[in-house]
Amino acid sequence: MARIVLKFGGTSVGDTDRIKNVARKVKAEVQRGNEVAVVVSAMSGTTNQLVKWVNEIAPLHDPREYDVVVATGEQVTIGLLALALQQEGVKSRSWMSWQIPIKTDDAYAKARIRHIDTGEMAATMAAGEVPVVPGFQGVSPDGRVTTLGRGGSDTSAVALAAALKADRCDIYTDVDGVYTTDPRIVEKARKIDRVTYEEMLEMASQGSKVLQTRSVELAMNHHVRVQVLSSFDAALGSDLPGTLVVDEDEIMAQGLEKSVVSGIAFSKDEAKITVTRVADRPGVAAAIFGPLAAANINVDMIVQNVSLDGSSTDITFTVPRADLARAVEQLQQARNDLKFAEVKSDTNVAKISVIGVGMRSHAGVALKMFETLAAKGINIQVISTSEIKVSVLVAAEYTELAVRALHTAYELDAD
């Protein structure tokens, strides 16, 4: 007998027919003799509608009341799925986050899970009951409802799996696994059977939408085996039809050698900022990025160009496109102290990333990337690297061309 957490996203529970389909999949897992807990999102479109209502009432709203409103979507889903499971003859009940409880900090609308008390739930699972838990939410130290931020249901599922010491956490989505790149861009993209936590974390943070970044980080820290698969497949098989996200050691133990490059990720949600003619002196970078950090604006790629006489420098970096206006505002407010010439911004950019743990032991990966893009006439604006990733910033209109060319260059195309 295994203990498994199943998570179903908004499209998987988008209407009552799909909820009934989910119930049948859960029942199949129970019939295999496994202990099962289920985490669900709100029905597709529900959270967007709830957020819209909040903004119509109070554009500058109290985040505590925002959480009260948007958390109701999952409450509907857990009740409906528990009823559907009962109709299938499966003993089940819904659990609100405060009933478990799922304890978070008090960062309303973007809370982080601190602890999950699974004692009572584990006892009911051992007795054959299937708990249905709302994703995306918890309870603050003050006893108020909190939400984890958009995409937080993946994080809820992995955290619950860690707390329950589950053998696996299955994340059901509208795709049947993790691919070498977006199949809508590259028809020859291949589904990956197994991918390491590190690779999946890079893919998620560099633009892949399959798993939420925080959920992958949590899985890696607690060694939770995660499987990504489709809720729209005809059957829930025991042969692991999706993509497994696991430790690199587990992959090597299977006698499988990792490819040098596992995938190509891209993101069009980037904006480039250049601060020109800043004094080249110690502390200037801290003075630029300090206000951005204080405003919770994440800075990604950074490059600095010092003038020939060494007196000034241009600093170029990227931020999420949604934060561009706030970032520029923060810099303008610091202009008198920084004494820069101007702030230039550009949203016509895309970040392309080549990812693979095999880079640790193979030279020439970055060179191949640069040569491939040059052959297609694509200019590189900014470069950043890590141990298992090389990212470049290019003009947005070259995104698809760059992804296709790199996918072929690294021999990732399906036969």
Image (cartoon, helix red, strand yellow):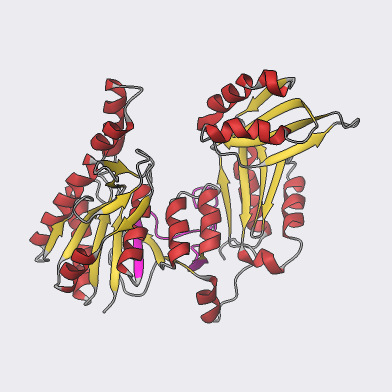
Residue 181 within the segment the image draws in magenta: yes
Viewer can see residue 150:
yes
| Residue 58: quarter of image | top left
Q: Position of residue 119 (x, y in %)?
A: 22, 66
Image quarter of the N terminus: bottom left
Q: Position of residue 269 (x, y in %)?
A: 53, 37
Q: Position of residue 31 (x, y in %)?
A: 19, 74
| Residue 234: quarter of image | bottom left
Q: Is residue 338 above or below residue 103?
A: above
Residue 80 within the segment the image draws in magenta: no
Residue at the extreme right: 309
Front residue of this view, candidates 130 and 293: 293
Q: Is residue 254 above or below residue 88?
A: below
Front residue of this view, candidates 289 and 87: 289
Q: Main secondary structure of the magenta part?
A: loop
Taking the image as shown, residue 91 lies to the left or right of residue 376, namely left
Q: Which residues are magenta?
A: 168-195
**Residue in the image at 43% along x and 51% along y:** 212
Q: Position of residue 379 (x, y in %)?
A: 74, 39
Taking the image as shown, residue 277 lies to the left or right of residue 355, namely right
Taking the image as shown, residue 203 lies to the left or right of residue 237, namely right
**Residue in the image at 73% along x and 20% along y:** 339
